[in-house]
Image (cartoon, grey):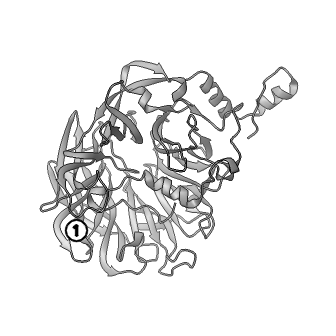
């Protein structure tokens, strides 16, 4: 995009100004006249005697009434833990509702559990250990449903692990589970087949695959449609040593292959109630170029990038707006990105940061995510809110001072504008937080907490590629994985694609 550096009354400069996209002009005006932002009531969700609590990434962790779910550590060390502190404590699923945090417990005999998602009826799904030990795998964990004060084991497909990742208002649950059939190319590196399931009316149903041995379901919407990924054959590709992975939509008993953008590896990161699916797909077989996609009414659309080689989505709301990240020309920066009506918008970053990633959005157009320094050591991380046409603002500027918490990650926002994420305590512990919008006052963002936006005119040009890091596929994968919250208490993670 051409930048307008000096606006004058000359015909040439006026023509250049009028040629700018309306959106870029709006962003420039937003920078000169920052939007008023509501302030928030901050809730420290806390833990169960341990140092850590968290909410899940890429799932609905706040429902419409404002109930939050996740996992919180107890004070009991976990002798089987393979992570560093503060995660080496038994972790239990939690539900926070109306100021009260409830320990949802585990399946009988289990030590660890984690809540991944909640529906508007207050039913919670996730995974829980059940007290059994598999000689080859370790503690057995089954998909679990917490409903009406009870924890329900959703069953297995014959293997030692199952994860429930989503639930709709009808009580249908989507997820993935291992069976007992050995698989040299087990999805996500498991030794046996991974199968997508839909649990409903007390029964777990294997949804099948797109032709290979493995599949995993990640989302279920209110229409009962399920989205996930599946191998399309059992033949490994020479480029990566595993079979081709395509996104799927399961609808009315049929698994639909959503296709690819030309590559052999794809991931799904969103499904809305309109049946739109979003994620990212490699464009080249070697994965050197990967783009975000939107599947809508039978067609797969390449959402493009901000001029670089890479983009990905992390969420899609019911308005059809998808959010995630994309690289700028020469892969010089990774910027939080919104895709709406087929158009990509660079949301910028908090001033001076090289990178940013959007994780969640709502139907009101509010977007949350993280702004990252992206220096050699990774750099500082700050959560942002983007609304009213931008620019983004640091969430730490919208909470009362002296809270003892420094907000670190913005993960999810519901349609009421309530935000969940993770914060650092002064003693180094980490707690999940909830931000509840206040109606009593608004304030303009401070200048040093607002963003720069590469799409706005009359901004300083980016340094040359030689003057900053060039974001490689490996760096992008590591950066994204850094914020993909894991079920650390179980030693598990909610699956994502092999390489982003």
The front one of 444 and 330 is 330
- Horizontal and vertical percent for residue 208? 38, 72
- Horizontal and vertical percent for residue 459? 69, 32
Q: Is residue 297 visible?
A: no
- Horizontal and vertical percent for residue 156? 24, 69
Q: Is residue 364 visible?
A: yes
Q: Is residue 229 shown left or right of residue 35? A: left
Task: Residue at 40%, 36% (x, y): give it.
Answer: 415
Quadrant showing the N terminus = top right
Q: Residue under circle 1?
A: 140
Task: Residue at 45%, 77% (x, y): give it.
Answer: 212
Task: Residue at 35%, 60% (x, y): give it.
Answer: 493
- Horizontal and vertical percent for residue 236? 51, 79
Q: Is residue 400 shown left or right of residue 460? A: left
Image quadrant assignment for residue 111: bottom left
Q: Is residue 267 shown left or right of residue 66? A: right
Q: Residue furthest right?
A: 11
Dot 1: few (<14), some (14–19), or many (≥20) neighbours within 10 Å? Answer: some
- Figure label count: 1
Q: Is residue 85 shown left or right of residue 333? A: left
Mark 1 residue element = strand
- Vertical relation: 48 (above or below) 108: above
Q: Residue furthest top?
A: 440
Task: Residue at 47%, 32% (x, y): give it.
Answer: 394
């Amino acid at each position: 995009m051409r930048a307008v550096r000096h606006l004058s009354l000359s015909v040439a400069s006026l023509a250049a100004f009028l040629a700018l996209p309306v959106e870029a002009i709006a962003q420039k005006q937003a920078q000169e006249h920052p939007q008023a932002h509501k302030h928030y009531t901050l809730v420290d969700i806390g833990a169960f005697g341990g140092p850590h609590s968290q909410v899940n990434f890429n799932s609905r962790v706040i429902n419409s009434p404002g109930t939050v779910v996740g996992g919180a550590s107890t004070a009991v060390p976990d002798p089987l833990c393979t992570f560093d502190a503060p995660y080496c404590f038994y972790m239990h699923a939690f539900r926070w509702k109306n100021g009260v945090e409830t320990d949802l417990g585990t399946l009988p005999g289990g030590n660890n559990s984690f809540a991944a998602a909640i529906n508007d009826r207050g039913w919670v799904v996730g995974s829980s250990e059940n007290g059994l030990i598999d000689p080859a795998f370790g503690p057995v964990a089954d998909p679990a449903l917490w409903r009406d004060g009870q924890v329900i084991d959703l069953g297995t497909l014959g293997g030692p692990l199952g994860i429930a990742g989503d639930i709709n208002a009808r009580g249908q649950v989507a997820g993935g589970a291992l069976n007992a059939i050995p698989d040299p190319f087990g999805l996500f590196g498991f030794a046996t087949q991974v199968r997508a399931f839909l649990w409903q009316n007390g029964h777990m149903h294997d949804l099948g695959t797109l032709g290979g041995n493995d599949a995993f379901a990640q989302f279920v919407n209110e229409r009962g449609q399920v989205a996930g990924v599946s191998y399309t054959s059992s033949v490994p590709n020479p480029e990566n040593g595993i079979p081709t992975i395509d996104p799927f939509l399961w609808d009315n008993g049929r698994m639909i292959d959503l296709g690819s953008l030309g590559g052999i590896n794809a991931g799904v990161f969103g499904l809305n109630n309109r049946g739109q699916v979003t994620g990212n797909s490699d464009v080249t077989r070697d994965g050197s170029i990967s783009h975000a996609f939107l599947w809508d009414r039978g067609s797969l659309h390449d959402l493009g990038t901000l001029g670089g080689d890479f983009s990905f989505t992390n969420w899609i709301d019911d308005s059809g707006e998808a959010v995630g990240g994309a690289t700028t020309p020469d892969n010089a920066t990774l910027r939080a990105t919104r895709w709406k009506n087929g158009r990509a918008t660079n949301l910028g970053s908090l001033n001076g940061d090289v990178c940013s990633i959007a994780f969640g959005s709502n139907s009101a157009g509010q977007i949350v995510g993280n702004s990252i320094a992206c220096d050699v050591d990774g750099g500082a991380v700050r959560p942002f809110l983007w609304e009213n046409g931008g620019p983004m603002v640091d969430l730490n500027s919208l909470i009362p001072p002296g809270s003892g918490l420094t907000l670190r990650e913005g993960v999810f926002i519901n349609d009421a504008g309530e935000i969940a994420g993770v914060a650092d305590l002064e003693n180094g512990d980490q707690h999940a937080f909830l931000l509840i919008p206040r109606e009593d006052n608004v304030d303009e963002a401070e200048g040093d907490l607002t963003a720069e936006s590469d799409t706005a005119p009359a901004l300083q040009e980016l340094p040359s590629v030689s003057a900053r890091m060039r974001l490689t596929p490996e760096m992008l994968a590591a950066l994204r994985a850094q914020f993909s919250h894991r079920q650390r208490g179980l030693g598990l993670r909610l699956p994502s694609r092999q390489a982003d």
